[in-house]
Image (tube, grey):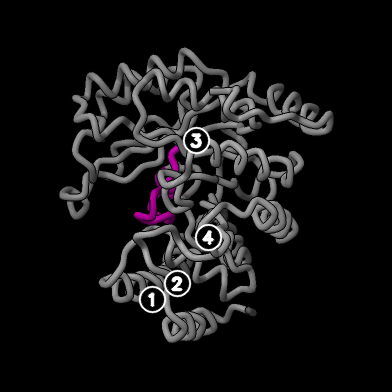
Amino acid sequence: MYDLLNYQFTEYYSNIKQQLKGVLMAKSKLRAMISGPMATVATPFDQEHMVDYGVMYDVTQWLVSRGLVTGKSVLKVAAAMGEGPQLRDTEWPHLLRTTVQAAKGRVPVMCGIHNKDTIRAIEDIKIASDMGAVAVQLSAPIHNGPTEDDNIRFFTDVSNSIDIGIMIYNTHSMAGGAISIDGFRKLVELENIIAIKWSPPVADRPIPGKYEEIFEFIDNVNIIDNCFGPARCIQQGGHGYMSHTVDIYPEHDFKLWDLLSSRRFIEAEQLWESVEKPLGEFSARVGKDSGGQATLKKAMMAVVGHPMGAPRPPSNPLNANEIAELKEIMLGFGWDI
């Protein structure tokens, strides 16, 4: 696997990697880094749908210059919204390394690891560690139809075999991805399990209490809301949320995080819904003809002046009229774009 990558690290990058390794020694220190509004960064493609590493370097530097730094955000690359499952094994490590090099230790960088068996997950996480990731977002091998016991063994064996942090991607909405609260009790004590990306079972979302169950573990791991409601998460003692917008217009999410940190939850909820609801309605409407998690993200990046190319087929990009409508929606938020 490493021979296929054939990467030669510069002395500067090696120093950055060693600095990150020092941070990773303590779970508490890493947990302190993985908080706030977390950005899932789009993967830039050229006209031939090949990864444009130069654009990725420039966008990372732009994000850092806009305030996405340690303590205020986290950059997550090669995740689902970043088209990670569509990336080749020779692409995602280079993308990750490029992001880490551009970040220069100023912001934590995570990587998505998707639907792999135990052996493959360990191999890929070791590569991610070598590329400089401080942690990975790891989902269960859902396409193999695992039981909950399989998933617990999976996360346990992986955690015991690596040297960076794991954020468990709780995938209740997919068959084979669910872990019960009793199951999490067996995982949260593991040294490298540092966070849970949390969304409750889809069928149970309207039932009070289900969402809150996970917060019994806030002293063991960070609870990161997965687009269910950051105010509800932080009010229960959570530590951050997945953001669709912090890498688009950071000022919005920094204001939201300030409200959450000040426990002004009603104002925070109103601000969050004022953006998420119009974007969600627009995305649902334009997504009827062609889906793909990266489509809206890439269109928004184009609106703010950082085009990332089209999503990889079979997903289609938004057309000119749809992008014009999206721009009007974003201007309606009061964003200076």
Q: Regarding mark 1 in the picture, which secondary structure is present there?
A: helix
Q: Position of residue 33 (x, y in %)?
A: 62, 37
Mark positioned earlier in the residue sequence (3 or 2): 3
**Residue closest to the far front:** 48
Question: Which of the two discs, 2 and 4, sits closer to the camera?
Answer: 4
Q: Could you tell me if the residues under marks 3 and 1 are in contact, i.e. CB atoms within 8 Å?
A: no
Q: Is residue 16 magenta-colored?
A: no
Q: Quick one: label 3, few (<14), some, or many (20+) residues within 10 Å? A: some
Residue bearing mark 1: 278
Q: Regarding mark 2 in the picture, which secondary structure is present there?
A: helix
Q: Could you tell me if the residues under marks 1 and 2 are in contact, i.e. CB atoms within 8 Å?
A: yes
**Amino acid, disc 3:** Asp
Mark positioned earlier in the residue sequence (4 or 3): 4
Q: Regarding mark 4 in the picture, which secondary structure is present there?
A: loop
Left or right: residue 205 versus residue 234 is left
Calculate the distance from the C-alpha at mark 4 to the C-alpha at mark 3: 18 Å
Calculate the distance from the C-alpha at mark 3 to the C-alpha at mark 1: 36 Å
Residue bearing mark 2: 275
**Amino acid, disc 2:** Val
In the rendered image, the quadrant that contains the C terminus is bottom right
> Residue at position x 57%, y 72% from top?
302
Residue bearing mark 4: 48
Residue bearing mark 3: 89
Mark positioned earlier in the residue sequence (3 or 1): 3
Q: Is residue 233 magenta-colored?
A: yes
Residue range highlighted in magenta? 222-236
Calculate the distance from the C-alpha at mark 1 to the C-alpha at mark 2: 6 Å
**Amino acid, disc 1:** Pro
